[in-house]
Amino acid sequence: MPATFEQIAEQAKARWQALTAGKRPWIRVGYAISGQAAGADGVFDAAIAACNQQGIEAEVTKVGSLGLNYLEPILDVTLPNGPRVFYANVNPDEVAGILTQHVRGGKPVTARAFAQQPAGATAFDGIPKLADLPEWKMQVRLAMRNCGNIDPHDIYQYVASGGYSALNKALTSMTSDQVLNEVKGSALRGRGGAAFPTGVKWSFLAPSKAPLKYVLVNCEEGDPGAFNDKGILESDPHTLIEGLLLAGYATNSNYGYVFIRHGHDLPVNATRRAIQQCYELGLAGKNILGTNFSFDIEVAFTGDSYVAGEETALMEAIEGKRSAPRFKPPFPAAFGLWGRPSNINNVKTIAYVPQIVQNGGAWFKSIGTQSSSGTAIVCLTGHIKRPGMYEIPMGLTIRQVLEDIGGGVVGQKIKLLQTGGPLGGVLGPEAFDTPIDFDAMSKAGAILGSGGIIVGNETVEVVDLIRNLVAFCQFESCGKCFPCRLGNTHMVEVLDRMCRGTGRTGDLDLMARIGSAMKVGSLCGHGQLGYNPISSALKFFGEEFKSRGQTGQKPLGSFHDGSMILPTRTRP
Amino acid sequence: MTTAHHGTSHTGHGGGHGANRDRIKVALTGQKQPTKTVLSSLLAIQDEFHYIPNEAIEETAQFCNSTANEVWSVASFYTNFRFTPPGEYTLDVCWGPSCHLMGAQKILKAVQDKIGLDKEGETPDKKITLRYNTCLGSCGLAPCIAVNHHVTGRVTAESAAQLASKLLGQ
Ligand SMILES: Cc1cc2nc3c(=O)[nH]c(=O)nc-3n(C[C@H](O)[C@H](O)[C@H](O)COP(=O)(O)O)c2cc1C
Ligand code: FES
């Protein structure tokens, strides 16, 4: 007999109580990809060793990422009923000392603590509150609400934080139409790039009476500079799974795929584990929570291919074929995976759904701007003081994000931003008062896309950066449409000679002609948008583009020593 | 939560072709997910061998009720598949735009100089396979490199070269 939701919630509450207000301290290590890359393995091992050596009986947990990449590795300590104290940039060598003083001595190492979360009224002196830090204060954490706080491998911690109550609410007190209407009412728009209204997309699929209908979640996340999809999956996979179940219910579908690139072990393992736990507790599979709703979920992999993230190419990849886009129409809602009606959404899009169902569409719509409701999950990287993943309300200006959250530029001054992935655009400082909002960003000449914001300072050569982006597009063209395959190759050739100082008169016109051929002659956005990096850069840095690359000039940027390493490839 | 370390035990030469075929069959039938396709099968085989042995094409075609042609077309499309055994360590250097701005070219150069390669591929002693990666997913810690999928961020030309010589056993 599967458990009722009340029984699961009861268990979860008891476990959470033991974790935070029991006898043992709780030690958490941020262990997402970013944590690992910063050395969290060593910190985790040192914490275990120190506990063993000092006879400390503690719960030591690998949690996901708070998003504060610049502070990683992060270790935090919560004494029973006490505040949660965060230590930043922790070196394995200092872990034993921190634990001796904080856990055995009961006093945090104030000089090393960057923030705390008080327990009720109890707080330590001399340590700032996390909620007061500028990069935290401006965030509204909806999809990221649990990231870095809970063990992504423990469904009970998710339930104790309010998880699966939206699913329970929907299944026990709402019709599928009512759920769909909440999502429509939220004005949620897709976070995968095209910003299409999610409720509208779902309503294409919902009425179909086909016996098998699919909901596909897109975590291909090939955009370099973006890591928020994998970030959610590795830190809080149940948020996505709950959203997927709700999407299945709202669209009367019965099967879900979470589509991830093979090799990203942390998000893959976390997602698989989450799905397995759902099956064990009766939250997935047949008659979920004892209702008539049945929904199966599995993880599907792609190999390395950027275009696999395009919605129809994704279906080809799940079917096990080369990930080349299909001709549309027919659209996925009519003819999708294996010819069956399907719906595709990005991870972030689906991750909002539990909160929308829980708090209502109107609540979500009240956050953000008129045209873009909710939050944006941005990844700040490059020449910025506080690189990381931040969830901000739509409508903050780019400048606020760069200065108040990002802490400003590394170097003299910001020269440019590259946003929305390699097919997105480049923005100059003139555009920094643009609000972060789908429509305002595209009007400014870039796209918000998946939320990557790469910052370049005064040392960056625009042509050299653009060459890097176009080289990516060349490398990743699936090859199906020849204007995209050959056009990208040709544009790389031109940009290459500009960088080497052997450019020719008329090169810019040549690229414009190639770009327009790609736009009309390609099936998917990869070719259609392939000229975007160049056109957007020309808008802000036209002079620099025109003055560079003429024959006889000295090589640019990363070509300065004449040894640029350029991977190119054409798919056979 | 462990990452795939392929360490030292994957030369893939051991045993004759028959042994290879047995391992391939185990990899094919051992797939746990409900949906098994040509792509999922090839990924399972590469997980086992760290490359796609010749016989795997035929075996996969048979397992998936497909053709050798179809299997080759998929295997040659995705850039993660390889058809010869990799070196003992696979060293990925990211050249994505975040890493590019933070100095990826210098890191690539330093690594190449250290291991004596000027393009992707294996060192003569088969210790290291060098790969260029379009994004290792940890752009907030750029520039990044990875050894057997394990990412290290905030590297410098010096630390990357040092790591490479450690892998070479120097
Ligand atoms: C070349 C190309 C690559 C894409 N890659 C992704 C991706 O990695 N992740 C994603 O969610 N959407 C990607 N998209 C957009 C998808 O086609 C699709 O619009 C999106 O997944 C729909 O989800 P949404 O409505 O929630 O935004 C890509 C599109 C193109 C043209
Ligand atoms: S661009 Fe290098 S890790 Fe993403």
Image: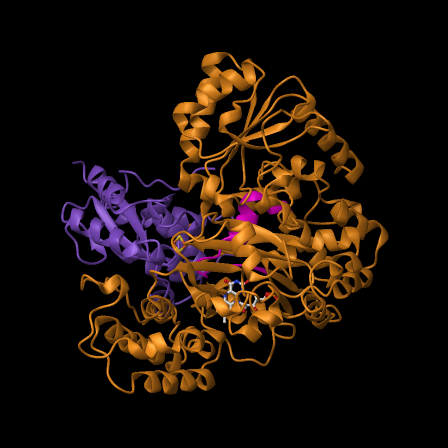
User: Where in the figure is residue A394, as x and y percent of width and height?
Assistant: 64, 60
Ligand 1's image quarter is bottom right
Determine which quarter of the picture holds residue A61: top right
For the residue pair A480 and A1, the one nearer the viewer reads as: A480
Which residue appears farthest toward the front when viewing the image? Answer: A412
* Magenta stretch encompasses residue A223: yes
Q: Quadrant of residue A206?
A: bottom right
Q: Which chain is orange?
A: A
The span shown in magenta is A217-238
Q: Seen in the image, is A461 located left or right of residue A126?
A: left
Placement of A32 over or under B17, stated as above or below? above
Vertical position of residue A467 compared to residue B149: above or below: below
The answer, for residue A274, to whether it is visible in the render is: yes
On screen, residue B54 above or below A387 = below
- For the C terminus of chain A, the image quarter is bottom left
Colour scheme of the rendered structure: by chain
Q: Is residue A221 visible?
A: no
Instruction: Please report the residue visible at 45 percent of the width from the left and 24 percent of the height from the top.
Output: A95
- Locate the N terminus of chain A by quadrant: top right
Q: Which chain is purple?
A: B
Q: Residue B23 at what x, y percent from top left? A: 34, 46
Q: Is residue A460 above or below residue A516?
A: above
- Residue A363 percent location from the top left of the image: 78, 56
